Image: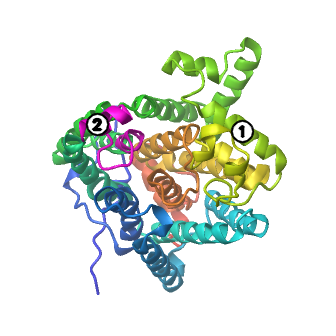
Amino acid sequence: MSQDVYFAPSQTDRAPSTGGRQSPAPLSRSRPMIDRFALIPILACIFATIVSPLEYTLLKLPPYEDRIDTKIFWPVMAAISVVSALRNHSRLPRPFPSHLICLFAYLAFAGASVLWAFNPGLSLARFAQQAMIVTCIVLPTLLAAPGSDILRGLFLWCFAPAAILNVAFVFENSPSIVAALKGYPGFFMGKNYLGEFAAIPFLLALHEMLYSGWRRVFGAVILVVATWLLFWANSKTAFGLALLVPLAAGLTLLIRRVTRLSPAVILLSVPLCFILLSSVSHFGLPRLSYMLYGDSSLTGRTVIWDFANTEIARHPLLGWGYQSFWLAGPDAPSVTDAPGWVKQMPDGHSGYVDTKLELGYVGFALLISFILATLHGVGRMADRAPARAWLVLSLALYVIVYNFLESLWMRGYEFLWVMFVILAAEIGRYGRPIPLRRAARGLKRLGRRPPPGARAQPRAGLS
């Protein structure tokens, strides 16, 4: 029987204190170990972020579902996850977190769309893989011990090694490839992939800088490496978002602390205000794109979106079926109906446009419900672990905004999609109510009087 070593919850979940109070023991002294359940989502992220890109770059293997290792890895991981959940069902939260219910509803509707999909066989195969991916991330994460630090495990075992490895590949990228892509791809398929990736270790390293000792030193090293990769990838979007989302996350949590509004409500007001402003002043996305990139078409994306909107109008309610529009065969509508070079597109370069295209406005509503419920769950996390909530919200905002320009929602095992599902499951671990006795001890440490009867509550329900 393997021995599991956990972080102490009282140390892992607390940020360094402020306001002159004595801070908890430095987290850098904790042993960076995880339990056997937390290992499964970390391995899933390693496969999506390191193994799969290296297979494509070094071994020239076909992408995604055509690989034999893909057909073995995800079923095995999903089977282990289901068996673990059945044998340890008492560790699963009750009631089930609402945002994860939204995720499974979104996933279930994608499966149901096979019934009306343009290419049912292909849609079913892609849905089956997606169901296994979500299963082997959500269930083990919820089973993990409360003190198991999954995000730090991802930093140490996945994103930090991948960042260092990409440095070596950047030096090996040929000048012809760099000139053609207008940036360095590292070991990924393109320079945008490298930029998309590098922002993740950048944000994780920022969080590591909050702590002391060697943890801060290593975080500083990876922060420099990730910044260097962002620069050489020449991905303006990734670089800009890496700088903006930590500030946006911090401001959101500060507003929530003052107003007690849900982070979902605070953040939803931003696009609503932009839509209102653009309708009044005619300052829309094309104008913003021209100011940022010198190109009002967002490098041709608006052409793709115009075509996609005409196809959405043909099947507005239920869509064309899960992943049954792009790359769905020689007679697919993306080939027969698309103009010019749009026929060659693998996706619509927007996760939101592709969701409406494939699952209609019903699927789009389910996706938005999942996103908003996940953002709302960050508020509960902030009550217990402010620094962790800031990191999770920063990463979540990065994925949410990036999906406006790339199609990542429920798209195979794209590493940003895998990361977002891990974040959602991590938020679910903080959804259990705090026992009153533990809350009373926390209030006493802060010098506040606990509510009447708090000391008399039983300890039942402690995880």
Which of these two is toward me, 436 or 239? 239
What kind of residue is marked 2? Ser
Is residue 91 positioned above or below 276 on the image?
Answer: below
The kind of secondary structure element at disc 2 is helix
Judge from the rendering whether residue 57 lies leftward or rightward of residue 350; answer left or right. Answer: left
Q: Which residue is mark 1?
A: 307
Q: Quadrant of residue 51?
A: bottom left
Density class for disc 1 (Cα within 10 Å; few <14, some 14-19, many ≥20) is some
Can residue 81 be seen by looking at this rendering? yes
The kind of secondary structure element at disc 1 is helix
Judge from the rendering whether residue 189 lies leftward or rightward of residue 30; answer left or right. Answer: right
Q: Which residue is mark 2?
A: 176
Q: Quadrant of the N terminus?
A: bottom left
Judge from the rendering whether residue 137 lies leftward or rightward of residue 274; answer left or right. Answer: left
Density class for disc 2 (Cα within 10 Å; few <14, some 14-19, many ≥20) is few
Horizontal and vertical percent for residue 284? Answer: 67, 20
Main SS of the magenta segment?
helix
Q: Which residues are magenta?
A: 174-198
The residue depicted at 40 percent of the width and 70 percent of the height is: 40
- Look at the image and say whether residue 369 sits in the magenta stretch: no
The residue depicted at 50 percent of the width and 46 percent of the height is: 383
Is residue 404 positioned above or below 3 on the image?
Answer: above
What kind of residue is marked 1? Phe
Q: CA distance from mark 2 to mark 1?
A: 32 Å
